[in-house]
DNA sequence: CAGAATCCCACGGGATACTG
DNA sequence: CAGTATCCCGTGGGATTCTG
């Protein structure tokens, strides 16, 4: 059952923001790019403010949108690896750009970054 | 009294998404770029799904973040013009990119755009 | 025309506890 | 380890009405 997460997009900008908006998606895509592949636990450590529920939910949505792929190793203890798909990787230049812009703004306003996400 | 709209950003990506996230900001910045300057009423027509409350609220936030500037003409009937600031303009390449990406995805999935926002 | 003022609600997101 | 399962809440956003 595919959940109803989206309204009919008005235009392409609307569509895109519906995919990568929300509180964590940008950062997840960003981290997955700089690290190539990340396990669930590693990713969680990089998102200190996320709860397990949101973590799973967000990853599922990214997966459903084919931005992220999920590889399960059937072993004990369980191991799951996340990585970017080609479609997801296409968003990197844009997030790169956004990161640079944000960083510059933060410097200008003397806002300190809790995590240097580079 | 500056409203409390933001949590302390974790990193630059987080910061940026807090500025241009939400349902309308991307589109507003995008429209303001392709049109240089827009009156309140014109902008509203381009955002068929927005209510006056959200329209004003969103524009005020963009203004407070210095992405958009607001010029009031003190005349009857009132006239207010919105345009991008230099900081706001810096986001354009990034939204351009996002628009292209979204457009491509929508084509692939045969999703029809209600508005061609180009 | 460009909004301000109310009132209201869904849902994005949070906290905690449990499990294959 | 990598999740579910519940329960819960704040706020982003909506609908409607009013005004300089």
Image (cartoon, coloured by chain):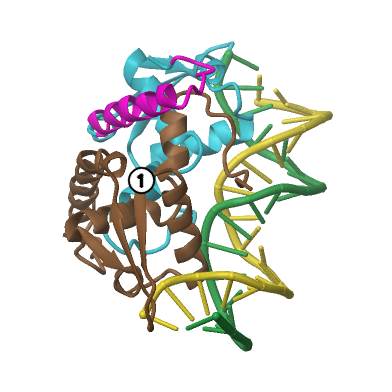
Chain colours: A cyan, B brown, C yellow, D green
Front position in the image: A28 or A41: A28
Left or right: A51, with A80 as reference point? right
- Residue at the far front: name it: B74
Neighbour tally class for label 1: few under 14, some 14-19, many 20 plus, Cα within 10 Å: many
Residue beneath the point at 54% across and 38% down: A57
Give x and y (percent) for residue A56: 55, 33
Q: Is residue B109 magenta?
A: no
Q: Is residue A99 magenta?
A: yes
Left or right: A54, with B101 as reference point? right
Magenta-drawn segment: A91-116
Front position in the image: C13 or B23: B23
Give x and y (percent) for residue B7: 59, 34
Give the vertical position of B31 relative to C19 (above or below): below
Task: Name the image quarter holding residue A91.
Answer: top left
Give x and y (percent) for residue C12: 55, 47
For the stretch drawn in magenta, the main secondary structure is helix
**Residue A36 visible in the snapshot:** no
Residue beneath the point at 38% across and 24% down: A103
Left or right: A91, with B11 as reference point? left
Label 1 marks a residue whose chain is B
Give x and y (percent) for residue A60: 47, 38
Left or right: A56, with B100 as reference point? right
Front position in the image: C12 or B56: B56
Residue beneath the point at 40% across and 57% down: B24
The residue wearing badge 1 is B67
Front position in the image: B29 or A87: B29
**Number of marks drawn:** 1
**Residue B84 visible in the snapshot:** yes
Q: Secondary structure at mark 1?
A: loop
Quarter of the image with the C terminus of chain A in it: top left
């Amino acid at each position: 059952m595919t959940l109803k997460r989206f309204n009919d997009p008005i235009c392409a900008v609307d569509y895109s923001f519906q995919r990568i908006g929300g509180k964590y998606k940008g950062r997840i895509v960003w981290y997955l790019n700089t690290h190539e592949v990340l396990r669930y636990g590693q990713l969680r450590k990089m998102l200190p403010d996320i709860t397990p529920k949101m973590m799973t939910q967000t990853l599922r949505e990214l997966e459903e949108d084919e931005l992220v792929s999920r590889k399960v190793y059937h072993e004990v203890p369980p191991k799951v690896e996340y990585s970017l798909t080609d479609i997801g990787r296409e968003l990197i230049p844009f997030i790169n750009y956004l990161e640079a812009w944000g960083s510059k703004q933060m410097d200008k306003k003397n806002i300190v970054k809790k995590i240097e996400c580079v």
